[in-house]
């Protein structure tokens, strides 16, 4: 047994209160068994490992804790919350490895074990929040219910930091479902709880989530303010997974803003961190974001590398697989490789079929719009654009619609080139005007300025 930062360096005897060395199995003074203290110690070590993203270490400490618990009565294990805590920690390990099904099973066992136990509120709130995370992508309604229950348990026990996490997650779900006003209301509560709690991890995560809401809705400078507040906390955050989420969030934000230098800086940092700590869920997202960044910069071989890396992880069964397929489809459309582009669009269609109206359907319609535009199939392209537009309105995502309008119009103009095609020129002009208005309203001057330049070159009146 080795010492870990912030953990006591001795084992406390429950009988005579003597401090014992970490290796001791029985108390040096009274010979009482130290199994309870040892089990506690291994669970503490496993939790510290998970915080530091050392998942393999955590697993071996958890196995040691199980060995110590074998010598304890089930009553002792239950009263000390040992069994529930072991299930919860195992659930966290599975989650970070991308095994959400296995994670859920362990968490439900933890919850069962916590029922009617005294002093179990904090752990119950953590387990409920993590159940929400495990359900997040595929069963949104369940996730919202778990987050709500977690926040209620945490608030009743004055656990502000835990309440903040659950409330911020609840806000995120409402944001994704297009209930913007409700999302803002939950975020306000989450920020208040996070500030009361004073825990930099929770506060950083909450700032990051508030930033993502402003990124979809504007005003954009407010998104930057919040992500920079989160970044400023990073050197106080001992949890590399939390730092990784914040740096990825910063990279994605700057990419939308088209500050490519800042975007690349933060995305590379997030990617390196996700790889080092083996945070599979985020390693997937950093690859998608880097692929999009490099495609915009015109570095196609590197863009393909990252998109393929993300695509090869799609067994993770997460929403990011749609993003990875879109990144690959856009890459092949740029290269006019229709066969490959169509293959990934077909797969996007397969995964989004039968789902509720959401991001995967949007990615599918988005990719088809651009494929047909690049082929000059105007009618089909317009039909898919209308569908994509309907989805963004349902999801209340102003940014995605403006972004697609710009890409769609840009590709129309690229297709006709110097040729005279008044119908297409008028349509492209109208789309650019709409996109520019949204970007101006969202206070994104770099995006707005670029379109303004394009508009000056695009005729909107056609002489008869
Ligand atoms: Zn003793």
Image (cartoon, rainbow, N blue to C red):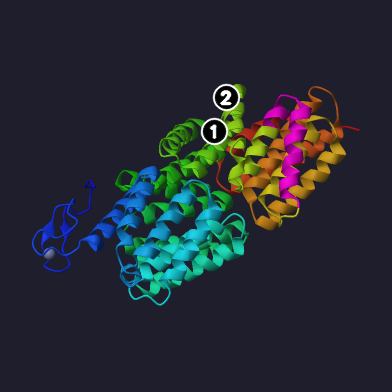
Is label 1 in a helix, a strand or a loop? helix
Q: In which quarter of the image is ligand 1?
A: bottom left
Is 434 drawn above or below residue 37 in the view shown? above
Quick one: which residue is furthest to the right in this view?
464
> Would residue 8 be found to the left or right of residue 319 on screen?
left
Q: In which image quadrant can residue 193 be found?
A: bottom left
**Residues at discs 1 and 2 in contact (Cβ within 8 Å):** yes
Q: Position of residue 299 (x, y in %)?
A: 59, 23
Is residue 396 found inside the magenta-colored segment of the image?
no
Q: How would you rate the neighbour count of disc 2 (Cα within 10 Å): few for under 14, some for 14-19, many for 20 or more?
A: some
Q: Position of residue 238 (x, y in %)?
A: 32, 47
Q: Where is residue 449 in the image (x, y as percent from the top left)?
A: 60, 35
Please tell me which residue is depicted at 24% across the width and 61% down the height of the picture.
Answer: 35
Q: How far apart are marks 1 and 2 (CA)?
A: 9 Å
Which stretch did the figure color magenta?
A: 330-353
In-front residue for pair 58/425: 58
Q: Residue 302 carries which label?
A: 2
Q: In which image quadrant can residue 316 be found?
A: top right
In-front residue for pair 79/263: 79
Please tell me which residue is depicted at 44% across the width and 63% down the height of the picture.
Answer: 127
Decide if residue 228 is in sight here.
no
> Would residue 31 be found to the left or right of residue 252 on screen?
left
List the residue tagged with mark 1. Answer: 290
Comes first in the chain, label 1 or label 2: 1
> Would residue 252 be found to the left or right of residue 84 on screen?
right
Is residue 342 found inside the magenta-colored segment of the image?
yes
Q: Position of residue 15 (x, y in %)?
A: 15, 69
Please tell me which residue is depicted at 69% across the width and 36% down the height of the picture.
Answer: 407
């Amino acid at each position: 047994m080795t010492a870990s930062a912030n953990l006591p360096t001795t084992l406390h005897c429950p009988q005579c209160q003597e401090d014992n060395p970490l290796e001791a199995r029985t108390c040096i003074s009274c010979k009482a068994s130290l199994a309870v203290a040892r089990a506690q110690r291994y669970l503490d070590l496993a939790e510290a490992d998970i915080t530091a993203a050392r998942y393999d270490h955590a697993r071996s400490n958890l196995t040691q804790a199980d060995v110590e618990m074998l010598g304890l009565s089930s009553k002792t294990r239950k009263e000390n919350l040992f069994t529930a805590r072991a299930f919860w920690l195992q659930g966290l390990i599975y989650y970070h490895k991308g095994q959400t099904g296995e994670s859920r099973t362990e968490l439900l066992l933890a919850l069962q074990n916590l029922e009617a136990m005294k002093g179990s509120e904090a752990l119950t709130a953590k387990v409920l929040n993590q159940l929400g995370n495990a359900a997040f992508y595929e069963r949104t309604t369940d996730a919202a219910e778990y987050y709500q229950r977690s926040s209620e348990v945490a608030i009743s026990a004055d656990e502000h930091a835990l309440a903040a996490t659950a409330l911020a997650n609840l806000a995120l779900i409402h944001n994704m479902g297009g209930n913007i006003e409700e999302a803002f209301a939950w975020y306000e509560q989450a920020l208040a709880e996070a500030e009361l709690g004073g825990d930099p991890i929770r506060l950083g995560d909450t700032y990051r989530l508030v930033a993502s809401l402003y990124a979809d809705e504007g005003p954009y400078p407010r998104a930057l303010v919040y992500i920079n507040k989160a970044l400023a906390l990073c050197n106080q955050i001992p949890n590399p997974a939390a730092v990784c989420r914040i740096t990825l969030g910063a990279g994605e934000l700057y990419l939308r803003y088209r500050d490519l230098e800042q975007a690349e800086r933060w995305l590379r940092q997030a990617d390196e961190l996700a790889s080092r700590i083996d945070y599979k869920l985020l390693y997937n997202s950093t690859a998608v974001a880097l692929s999009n960044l490099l495609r915009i910069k015109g570095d196609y071989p590197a863009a393909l590398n990252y998109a393929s890396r993300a695509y090869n992880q799609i067994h993770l069964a997460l929403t990011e697989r749609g993003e990875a397929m879109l990144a690959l489809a856009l890459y092949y459309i740029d290269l006019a490789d229709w066969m490959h582009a169509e293959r990934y669009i077909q797969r996007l269609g397969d995964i989004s079929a039968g789902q509720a109206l959401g991001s995967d359907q949007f990615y599918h319609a988005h990719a088809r719009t651009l494929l047909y535009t690049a082929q000059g199939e105007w009618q089909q392209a317009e039909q898919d654009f209308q569908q994509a537009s309907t989805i963004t309105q349902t999801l209340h995502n102003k940014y995605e619609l403006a972004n697609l309008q710009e890409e769609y119009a840009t590709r129309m103009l690229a297709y006709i080139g110097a040729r005279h095609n008044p119908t297409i020129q008028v349509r492209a002009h109208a789309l650019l005007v709409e996109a520019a208005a949204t970007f101006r309203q969202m206070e994104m001057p770099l995006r707005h300025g670029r379109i303004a330049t394009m508009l000056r070159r695009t005729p909107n009146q056609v002489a008869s």
